Image (spheres, rainbow, N blue to C red):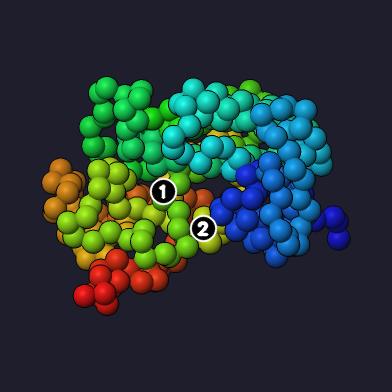
Amino acid sequence: MGDPMRVVITGAAGRLGTTVASLFHAEGFDVVATDTAQPADVDYRFEVADLRQHEQASSVLTGARVVIHLGNHPGIGNTPPQVVFNENVTMNENVFQGAVEHGVEMVVFASTIQLIGSKPDLRTVVSPPALPRFPVDGMTAPVPANVYALSKEVGEVMLRYYADRCGLCTVALRLPLLHHEEGHFSVDSGNESHDDIFEGFTGLTYADAARLMLALVRTDLSGHHVLAAGTAHRHIEYSVSELIERFYPDVHPNIDDLINLDAVQSLTGWCPSPVQWRNPAYIVEQQGS
């Protein structure tokens, strides 16, 4: 029996990163987790590294067969847009090029559903895009409305380059809002935001996102893949058909979800779990009335 597969997980101090690293460690992989600061009490190897520095990025990739690359700015926030874009692209190039140099076989990259046009940043956008055509999937054309999403689109293009030109197996996962089933991430009638509507009220638990990454690593893949994952579950009053009737009149009323999971399910067999909101917003309001 050979040594366990080494999997490097970047951005491993964040909520998604810790969930992914813990799952892979529990499943018997040789986990090397990395971030700019180490969380307390982890059971796996953790190396502090700044991915903006290519020497540090390269050093953590030694011996890796798979890289789960989560280490980017997590959104646009209040950070200057130039900083978000430049640093994300720099981190991605250092990881992707380093993966090739170290003989890594597979890179899984956390992209974003924001590529379809949600969360316009008025510092950089004067013409927001139109509502996307649902259901969305990995084939939906990107129309980023902030430079965080733009950096993710560039990351997807970079991944294709390394797949086509260097033989890496690469996967870009367009992830929606991630949560631990906290009730404040649910949406009720009258409180639907622009971003909720643009993203089809979609979400995914951290645990399901981690399970999907594990399924991808255990699947015999080659080439480049762009996959969307999530479900339209965050509206706690309306079914998918009711969401379509109220917010998406151009969409066929008989679709099952506002994200098309056919590609990811055919590749991996993965399915998201049912969500049980902890103290949904409308229950909290009723309890307090």
Q: Quadrant of residue 159?
A: top right
Against 155, is 18 above or below? below
Residue 245, given in percent of the width and then of the height, sits at: 13, 54
Q: Is residue 285 left or right of residue 245?
A: right
Q: Please indicate, yes or no, whether residue 114 appears anywhere in the rendered image.
A: yes
Instruction: Work out whether residue 209 or residue 218 is closer to the camera in this orientation and state it.
Output: 209
Compare marks 1 and 2 and give the one earlier in the sequence.
Answer: 1
Q: Residue 85 carries which label?
A: none
For disc 1, the marked residue is 176
Residue 44, given in percent of the width and then of the height, sits at: 76, 58
Instruction: Work out whether residue 28 or residue 199 is closer to the camera in this orientation and state it.
Output: 199
Q: In which quarter of the image is the C terminus?
A: bottom left
Residue located 29% across and 48% down the image: 196
For disc 2, the marked residue is 206
Residue located 26% across and 29% down the image: 129
Q: Quadrant of residue 100?
A: top right
Q: Is residue 118 left or right of residue 55?
A: left
Graded by Cα atoms within 10 Å as few (under 14), some (14 to 19) or many (20 or more), the crowding at tag 1 reads: many
Q: In this view, does 93 lie to the left or right of 48?
A: left
Residue located 63% across and 44% down the image: 11
Residue 179, given in percent of the width and then of the height, sits at: 45, 58
Q: Please indicate, yes or no, whether residue 269 appears anywhere in the rendered image.
A: no
Graded by Cα atoms within 10 Å as few (under 14), some (14 to 19) or many (20 or more), the crowding at tag 2 reads: many
How many numbered discs? Answer: 2
The residues tagged by marks 1 and 2 sit, at their Cα atoms, a distance apart of 11 Å
Q: What residue type is labelled 1?
A: Pro
Q: What element carries label 2?
A: helix
Instruction: Work out whether residue 77 or residue 107 is closer to the camera in this orientation and state it.
Output: 77
Q: What residue type is labelled 2?
A: Tyr
